[in-house]
Every structure is written in structure tokens, then in C-alpha cells.
Amino acid sequence: MPKTGPFDNYSDEYDDWFVINKYAFQSELNAIKKTLPENGDAIEVGIGSGIFAAPLGIKEGIEPSKAMREKAKKRGIRVMDAVAENLPYADKSKDVVLMITTICFVDDIYKSFQEVHRVLKDDGHLIIGFVDKNSPVGKFYLEQKDENVFYKDAVFWGTEELYEILKDTGFKINNTYQTVFGKIEEVKQVQNVLVGYGQGSFVVIKAQKL
């Protein structure tokens, strides 16, 4: 069963986080932009309210939360009711698939990546944005997990774990970027995007279908 309850019940609070933490959000967007090809047919899996998709120019995606789908539609995004483990797209039909702050909420990460592999064209790209569980923010979220309506049922991942799962599901790693350094509430300006991982709490992996 998709973990949609918190997103259906607290969709406004979810979007509010990105307004309150606007500099961290802009830093995250900049990290994702470094990986996005200029052209191609792109979708987002777990598009949520479209908070990332809209500024990134992503026009289509899937989202199992009804409340989030309604918000995404208001942002002009085509969104279908579906889950990552069963994508409603034809084989080899997409150039780029984004999963931004989505992987911690999927039921089966292997099946999700296999589905992305299926719908990507040959040499297509999967772009994953996530909070690394070994980072300062990741550790804080893990400590607060039981008290946070969004993260109570979440599964957090480390970058190296994801490298292994991506390789197991038919991908090679192209690039990795990181941003959001220190505590979220202390981010008072847009931060740099650095290559690699291990310092920044928000990590973006660009992987290519083999």
C-alpha cells in the first residue's frame, strides 16, 4: 500500500516547508538542474504537489496521493494516480525519470528502479534526489522519525546503498552532487552545489540505463 496518508492529510504543511526553508529548497533545485538534460521526454515519479516539477519544467508524472495530485494539477502538471512499482508508461518511452524525495516512501525500491529501467529509452537517465541517511539532516530525521507525520513510515537510504541497488537494477552512475550543508534551520542563503557526497545532506544521483 502506498504511504499516502500523511500527504493526503497534511499537503499544505508539506508545501509550507519549502516556503519556510526557501534557501535550502533553491539549493536542492540547483543540484537537480545540474543533472537535467536540456531536451527529452521527462517525467517525475512521486511528483507530489509539483513543488519541484514546476520550477524544473517537468510537465508530467505520477502520484498516489489524491491531495497532492490536485495541487500538481493546479500547477499545470499532467499527473496520473499510480505508484513507482507499476508505472503506467510503455517500454522505452521516456528519456528521463526523476524521483525527488520519493525513494524513502516507495514500498519496493528494487521494483521501482526496475520499472524506471523498463520505461526509459536505451541510455536514458534516472535522476534521484534524496536526503542521505548518513548526513546531518538525515541523522536528525532518523532521530525524529516517530514524531514526524511524513517520515514515520519512511525508509532512509545512504548514497553507497543506492549505488549498489542501481547497479543491481541495470544502471551505471554518471554523476553525484551534494548541497545543504549543516542544519536546515541554519541555511540562510543559497548554498553551493559540490561534486560527490559525504558532506551535503541533499544528494542527487544521475544514473544511466545500461
Image (cartoon, rainbow, N blue to C red):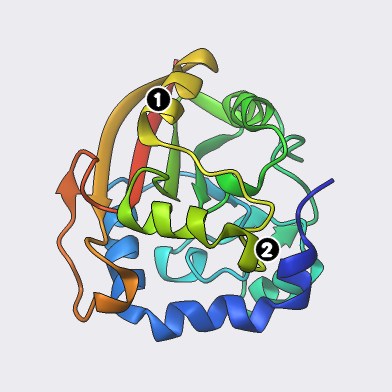
Label at residue 163: 1
Q: Residue at x 61, y 82 (%)?
A: 13
Image location (x, y in percent) of residue 73: 69, 73
User: Hey, which quadrant is residue 26 in on the image?
Assistant: bottom left
Residue 36 visible in the picture: no
User: Hey, which quadrant is residue 161 in on the image?
Assistant: top left
Q: Determine whether the residue tagged by mark 2 lies in a helix, strand or loop.
A: strand
Image location (x, y in percent) of residue 49: 62, 71
Q: Residue at x 52, y 44 (%)?
A: 156
Residue 142 visible in the picture: yes
Image location (x, y in percent) of residue 194: 15, 49
User: Hey, which quadrant is residue 149 in on the image?
Assistant: bottom right
Contact flag, marks 2 and 1 (Cβ < 8 Å) = no
* Residue hosting label 2: 78
Vertical position of residue 29 compared to residue 10: above or below = above
| Crowdedness near tag 2: few (<14), some (14–19) or many (≥20) residues, C-alpha within 10 Å | some
Type of the residue with mark 1: Tyr
